[in-house]
């Protein structure tokens, strides 16, 4: 199998580089720049990509690499810091730029270069640098320029060495994927036969090797990540894996049974599955509690306690598995060489009293959509794999005020109706137009407000709760806008909820964007 190495110099976009390479159907792996040359030689590579990084390559102690890397006869592409480093190591000069370019920048490229085959001669690129290549090493020519940067890209075609000052891996460089394709497929000559199922196969083999005869324990939440991790581990080591699924009674309607149907004894995998029905225990702890942060804390802590109790029944295990995915890793600042951005609630929250030797995280290098693809290939049903984000505290933070079994049941039913109707409208739109609806929300759910109001049903006065519908469009979940769900659909949902869900006599649609609102209500 053709393989490309992404040599990590600590930039923020390194996983994105790997992802773009994979999108060209080429397998790649990311290794630290500290990897020894002999190890690199043994990898049998078709190409090497040097990533960006936060340093200046002329500074003392900045990450560097031996000249030998460029003499292996393997094509090398340097990106940003990687491009500058290549020049410096080979005898060029890198200096602090008088004008620091940042953001979308017009660039003129030399379309005769194989790196830019098919790329428009004037295109947009994403720049983010303080330094620039002031003199190229011998044998190189400039193949792209911006207003302030005479060497926005350079090549020494005979040696197969290329450098790009900007970031082709980010979406702000609209033709960037073409450039990466040109490098891995045309310049390196990778045949493009790698597919996502090779990821599944390779990971299964690697997990088998790592785990050996060991025992593995996984906390299965029913969310996408832990489900796919469970699928991969089950494929790899079967009954050596035990999944503990804690049903805290705050899941969406039917969700607990759906998880059991896939992973339980009648499911599609061969593993040990333990379902803990801890509903009453959670409702008991939450009784009388109304303060949102307190509710979150109680649910989080109780979850860990229940998991620990089950783990202790199982006894010592060799591995504790986690469904950590790449964005969790980056946000926690655990991502290879990159800088800390913020800490994240899914990483680092380990149980205190579980006896294990090592952690195993099979999804650590994947983005969410790659996780979903892997899940589908493992045969996990679509409705589970395509699930929208669901918070750890579950419906606990979608019931404003005190949580009771009755309120959980109300919000489950209302939410089910809402999602069913929205999905129906979305499907109809797509069928009629061949494209997804422009208003397609990225997350949508029903919540239960703590407000009761007067209504009339038949000839009777009612005094019931108001349900709130939320639907947002968002790219990164850090900011969001209310989605423009068709009014007809909202009305159908309102009618159905009031008719079918006892305890609700009023329905609101939440228009708040984030900020100032958050996506969840508590
Ligand atoms: P907020 O409410 O902060 O939500 O705007 C942003 C995204 O994060 C999800 N969310 C959580 N996910 N544990 C999680 O795993 C949590 O405690 C949690 N709180 C919010 C939320 O569903 C949305 O997608």
Image: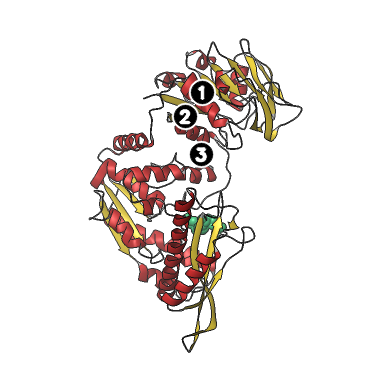
Q: Position of residue 237 (x, y in %)?
A: 26, 42
Residue that carries the numbered disc 2 in the rendered image = 31
Judge left or right: residue 307 versus residue 461: left
Q: Position of residue 507 (x, y in %)?
A: 53, 73
Q: Position of residue 285 (x, y in %)?
A: 42, 71
Residue that carries the numbered disc 1 in the rendered image = 183
Q: Position of residue 233 (x, y in %)?
A: 31, 44
The answer to which image quadrant residue 107 occupies is top right
86 up-or-down from 254: above or below: above
**Ligand 1 neighbours mark 2 (CB distance < 8 Å):** no
Q: Nearer the viewer, mark 1 or mark 3?
A: 1
Label 2 vs 3, first from the N-terminus: 2
Labels 2 & 3 near each other (Cβ < 8 A): no
468 up-or-down from 190: above or below: below
- Which residue is more in the foreground, 421 or 116? 421
Which quadrant is home to the C terminus? bottom right
Label 1 vs 2, first from the N-terminus: 2
Residue at x 58% of width, y 23% of height = 116
Q: Is residue 37 visible?
A: yes
**Ligand 1 neighbours mark 1 (CB distance < 8 Å):** no
Q: What's the CA distance linking mark 1 and mark 2? A: 19 Å
5 up-or-down from 438: above or below: above
Q: Is residue 64 visible?
A: no
Residue at x 52% of width, y 20% of height = 76
Q: Nearer the viewer, mark 1 or mark 2?
A: 1
The answer to which image quadrant residue 206 occupies is top left
Please rate how many residues cluster around mark 3, counting C-alpha atoms within 10 Å: few if below 14, some from 14 to 19, many from 20: many
Please rate how many residues cluster around mark 2, counting C-alpha atoms within 10 Å: few if below 14, some from 14 to 19, many from 20: some
Colour pattern of the rendering: secondary structure
Mark 2 secondary-structure assignment: strand
Label 1 vs 3, first from the N-terminus: 1
């Amino acid at each position: 199998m053709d393989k490309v190495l992404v040599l990590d110099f600590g930039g923020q976009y390194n996983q994105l580089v790997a992802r773009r390479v994979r999108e060209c159907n080429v397998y790649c792996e990311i290794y630290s720049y500290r990897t020894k040359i002999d190890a690199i030689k043994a990898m049998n590579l078709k190409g090497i990509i040097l990533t960006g990084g936060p340093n200046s390559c002329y500074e003392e102690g900045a990450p560097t690499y031996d000249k030998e890397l460029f003499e292996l006869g393997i094509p090398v592409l340097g990106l940003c810091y990687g491009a500058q480093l290549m020049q410096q190591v080979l005898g060029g000069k890198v200096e602090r730029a008088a004008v620091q370019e940042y953001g979308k920048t017009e660039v003129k490229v030399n379309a005769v270069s194989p790196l830019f085959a098919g790329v428009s001669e004037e295109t947009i690129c994403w720049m983010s640098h303080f330094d620039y290549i002031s003199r190229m090493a011998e044998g190189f020519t400039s193949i792209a320029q911006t207003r302030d940067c005479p060497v926005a890209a350079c090549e020494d075609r005979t040696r197969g060495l290329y450098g790009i000052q900007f970031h082709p891996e980010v979406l702000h460089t609209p033709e960037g994927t073409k450039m990466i394709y040109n490098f891995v497929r045309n310049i390196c000559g990778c045949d493009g036969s790698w597919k996502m199922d090779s990821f599944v196969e390779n990971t299964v083999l690697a997990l088998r090797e790592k785990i050996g005869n060991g025992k593995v324990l996984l906390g299965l939440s029913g969310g996408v990540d832990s489900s796919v991790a469970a699928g991969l581990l089950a494929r790899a080591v079967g009954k050596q894996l035990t999944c503990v699924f804690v049903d805290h009674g705050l899941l969406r309607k039917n969700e607990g049974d759906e998880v059991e149907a896939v992973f339980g004894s009648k499911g599609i995998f061969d593993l040990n599955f333990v379902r803990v029905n801890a509903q009453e225990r959670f409702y008991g702890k939450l009784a009388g509690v109304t303060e949102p942060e307190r509710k979150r804390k109680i649910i989080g802590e109780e979850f860990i306690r229940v998991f620990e109790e089950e783990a202790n029944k199982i006894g010592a295990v060799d591995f504790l598995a986690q469904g950590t995915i790449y964005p969790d890793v980056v946000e926690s600042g655990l991502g290879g060489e990159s800088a800390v951005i913020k800490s994240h609630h899914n990483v680092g929250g380990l149980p205190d009293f579980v006896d294990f030797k090592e952690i195993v995280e099979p999804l650590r290098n994947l983005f969410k959509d790659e996780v979903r693809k892997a899940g589908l290939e493992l045969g996990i049903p679509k409705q589970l794999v395509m699930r929208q984000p669901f918070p750890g505290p579950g419906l606990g933070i979608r019931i404003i005020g005190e949580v009771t079994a009755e309120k959980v049941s109300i919000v489950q039913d209302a939410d089910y109706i809402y999602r069913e109707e929205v999905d129906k409208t979305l499907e109809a739109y797509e069928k009629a137009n061949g494209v997804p609806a422009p208003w397609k929300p990225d997350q949508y759910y029903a919540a239960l407000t703590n407000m009761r109001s007067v209504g009339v049903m038949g000839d009777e006065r009612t005094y019931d709760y108001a349900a709130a519908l939320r639907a947002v469009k968002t790219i990164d979940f850090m900011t969001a806008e209310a989605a423009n769900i068709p009014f007809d659909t909202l009305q159908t949902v309102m009618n159905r909820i009031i008719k079918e869900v006892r305890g609700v006599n009023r329905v609101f649609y939440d228009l708040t964007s984030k900020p100032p609102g958050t996506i969840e209500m508590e």
